[in-house]
Image: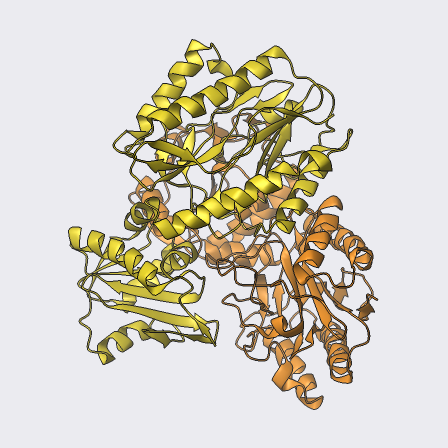
Chain colours: A orange, B yellow
Amino acid sequence: MENLLQIPSEEAQIRIQKIQELLIAQGIDALLISDNANKFYISGRVYNGYTYISANGNVIHFIRRPVDLIGDNLVYIHKPENINEILVERGYSLPNTIALELDITPYSTIQRLSKVFPNAQIANASGILRQVRSIKTDYELGLLKLSGEKQAKAYSQIPQTYKLGMTDLEFQVEIERLSRLEGCLGEFRISGDSMEIYMGNVICGENADNPSPYDFAMGGAGINHSLPVGCNGTTTAEGMAIMVDVNGNYTGYMTDMTRVFSVGELDDLSKKAHECSRRICKELSAIGKPGIEAKALYNKAIEIVEEEDLGHLFMGHRQKAGFIGHGVGIEINELPVIAPRSRDILAIGNVIALEPKFVIPGIGAVGVENTYIVTENGMECITHAPEEIINLI
Amino acid sequence: MENLLQIPSEEAQIRIQKIQELLIAQGIDALLISDNANKFYISGRVYNGYTYISANGNVIHFIRRPVDLIGDNLVYIHKPENINEILVERGYSLPNTIALELDITPYSTIQRLSKVFPNAQIANASGILRQVRSIKTDYELGLLKLSGEKQAKAYSQIPQTYKLGMTDLEFQVEIERLSRLEGCLGEFRISGDSMEIYMGNVICGENADNPSPYDFAMGGAGINHSLPVGCNGTTTAEGMAIMVDVNGNYTGYMTDMTRVFSVGELDDLSKKAHECSRRICKELSAIGKPGIEAKALYNKAIEIVEEEDLGHLFMGHRQKAGFIGHGVGIEINELPVIAPRSRDILAIGNVIALEPKFVIPGIGAVGVENTYIVTENGMECITHAPEEIINLI
C-alpha cells in the first residue's frame, strides 16, 4: 500500500486552491485532469486515472493503476464512464461546465470524456493549468534548486570524460552516463505532441548549423532521420566549440543549463559571441522583475545583439529559433515564453531558462543557458557552474 | 539542401498506395498526417508540417521546418491554414471527407485542422494508419532485422558491465551506455498520451512486484514518482533475478527483447517459470501463422501456464498485465495485440514481440521476450541471443 499523495497535504491544498480560484474566475464548475504532467503537479506522482476538481471544493481521484494506492477521496474505477455514477452516488451535483485538457489530450479521448458529462459544456483546462503551474510554490522551488545543484555537479564532471578524437555522440553518451549516475531521471518532459528529444543536445562543428524540425533553440542533424536533432556522429577536432545542453530532470522538476566546451582555443568571433550571451543573461536577469513583459526581455536581447553586430548568428544561422527563453518546471516548455509576441508578464515564482545562443558556422554553437527564479529583486540563478568556455585539451 | 524523402521513392509509393486503398474502401476523400511516427512512416524522416494524401492520387507535403528540404510535391507553409489555399491554387478539388489522426492528435489541434477543411466531414485516420503500419514492407523488415542484430550485439556485452553490489540503476546505466555506443537512438516511441518510459526496464528482487501505472508487461517502482516504472535503486544481491528489457530502437524501427540475468544460482521456481516462458515462445511462434486469431495465441499461453501451475505469477503477481505480446515497428505498441479480447488476426508481415513473463516475489522477474516476423510458416525470430538465464557472478 502506498499513499497517492507524494507531496505534503498542505502543499496539495495550495495547488488545488490555485486551480479552483481560476475555475471560479472563469465560471467553470469543475476540471478533470488526465495528463501525466498535471497529475504529477496535483499529487506528486503519476498514476493511471483522472482527478476531478470542482470549483466549490470537492476533489476526487479516480484511479485505475497502480493497484495499491490509498488516500482520501480516492476511488478505483475500471473506465472513465464510472466517474459519472460515482459523483451521483456521492450526492455531488454534476457540473454544468467541465474543463478538460483540450490542448494536450487526443481528440478521441476528449470525445469519450465529454460523454461522461453529457449535459455539461466543455471548457479548456489547458490554459488554467499552464497558468497555475507557471507560478511555482516554495516547495516546487526547493525541488528546482535541488535539480540545479545536481545538474551543476554532473556538468562539473564533463571535462574528465572527454578524449580527443571522440565523436559528438560518444561524448554525449559519457555525459548521459554521468548525469544518470548523479540521479538524472532521463525522461525529458515536453508539452506538445510533435516535440521530442532523447537526453539532450550535444552539437559541434558544422552540425550546429544543421536545421532541425523541432522548436528547440538549437538544431543539429541527429544520428537518424527518425529523430533529427542533436549530435550526428561528427568527430570532434581542434578549433571546434561543443555545446552541451543535457537533461536536468533530477526531481521531476527540470532545470535547463547549457555550457560550452572547446577543443583547443577558439577563434575571436566565437569568444565574442559567447561573452555576448553572458552579457545578455546578466542584463536580462537584472531587469527581469515582476510586472516586466516577457517580450521586453526579448527586445533587450536583440538590442544587445545588434549593438554587438551579431544578429546574423543569434539563435541560429541557417534556421533561427523564435524565442530566447522559456519557463521550466515539470515540463521543459512552460510559461512564460520569452519571445517577441509573447503576452506573458513576469511574476514572482516564475522559473525561466534564458538561452541566448549563437551558431558560428564551421565552429559550432556558443552561449550559456541558465535557469532563474523570478524574485522581487530580479532573476536569481539556480544553475551555478562556471560560464567560461572550458578547453578540453 | 536535403531530400524530404529518406526512403526510396518506390517504397514511399507502396506505403502511400496502402493508405489510399483503405481510403477508397472507406469512402474517404483524403487524409492529413500530422503525427511524427506517421510522417516517418510515409517519408523516412520527421519534419514539422503535414502531408496530405488524397484517395485519388495526389500527395502534397506541407513543410514548416527544417528550412532546407527539397522534393516533389513539397510546399513550404507558415501555418496549417495555408493548406486550403494551396490546394485551391493547384486546382485540386477539396475533400468532402478528410481523415485526421483523432486518436493521437490533441483536441485543439483537430479543431484547428477541421477549419482548414470547413465543408468536409471529419473521419478518423488513426485506425487506417495503424492497420497499414501493422503489415511491414520488405524494406521495413530489413530495418527491423538490423535493429534485432544490433540489439542482440548490445545484449551480448551486458554481463561484462556487471559488478557485484551494483544497484539496479547503476547496472541499467551501464546497459544504456553500451546500447547507445552500439547505435541505439534512445528515443522510445510509444503511442498513447499517458505512456512513458526512459530507456527501458531493469528490475530485480522485490521491486519486480511493485505495480506501476503504465500499461507495460512489467512494473517496478522507478526512482522517482514522476516516472514510476523500472529500477528503484535496489542493491543487486545473490539469489536475485535481474530482468533486462532495454530499448531496441537502432533504425527508427524498434525490436523488443528481454533477457534475464542472475546473481548466483536461482531457486527452482524461478528456473521453472523461465523455462515455461521459453516453451510459450516456442509453441506460440510455431502456431502463429497468417489467419490465426491473436487471442488464440493468448489462450494457448494461458493453457500452458495453467498446465504448469504458474498462473498466479504470470504477467505479474500483485498487478497483472492484460496482454502477452504486441506489434512493434516505429512504435513499441503497434498492432496486432496478443490479448484475450483482441480482434486482430495475424497476417504476413506483422512483427510481434512475445513477452510471457513471470514475477517471482522476492526474487525478481523471469522469462524471455523476442521479436518475430509472421511468415507463411510461422513466426521467425529476429532477436537472436541466448535465452538461458545468465549467471553474472
With B306 as the anchor, is A9 left or right in this view? right
Query: In the picture shown, does residue A137 fall above or below B70?
Result: above
* Furthest residue toward front: B377
The quadrant of the picture occupied by the N terminus of chain A is top right
With A274 as the anchor, is B85 left or right in this view? left
Camera sees residue B89 = yes
Query: In the picture shown, does residue A131 fall above or below B367?
Result: below
Q: Which residue is drawn at 66% across and 88% down?
A: A306
How many numbered marks, from 0 up? 0
With A176 as the anchor, is B334 left or right in this view? left
Residue B80 x, y percent position in the rendering: 35, 70
The quadrant of the picture occupied by the C terminus of chain A is bottom right
Residue B13 x, y percent position in the rendering: 29, 61
Q: Which residue is drawn at 55% across and 59% down?
A: A131
With A331 as the anchor, is B103 left or right in this view? left
Q: Which image quarter: residue A370?
A: bottom right
Q: Which residue is drawn at 63% across and 74% down?
A: A206
Residue A169 x, y percent position in the rendering: 65, 58
Residue B364 x, y percent position in the rendering: 62, 23
In front of the other: B123 or B264: B264
In front of the other: B261 or A72: B261
Camera sees residue A376 = no
Query: In the picture shown, does residue B392 fall above or below B150?
Result: above
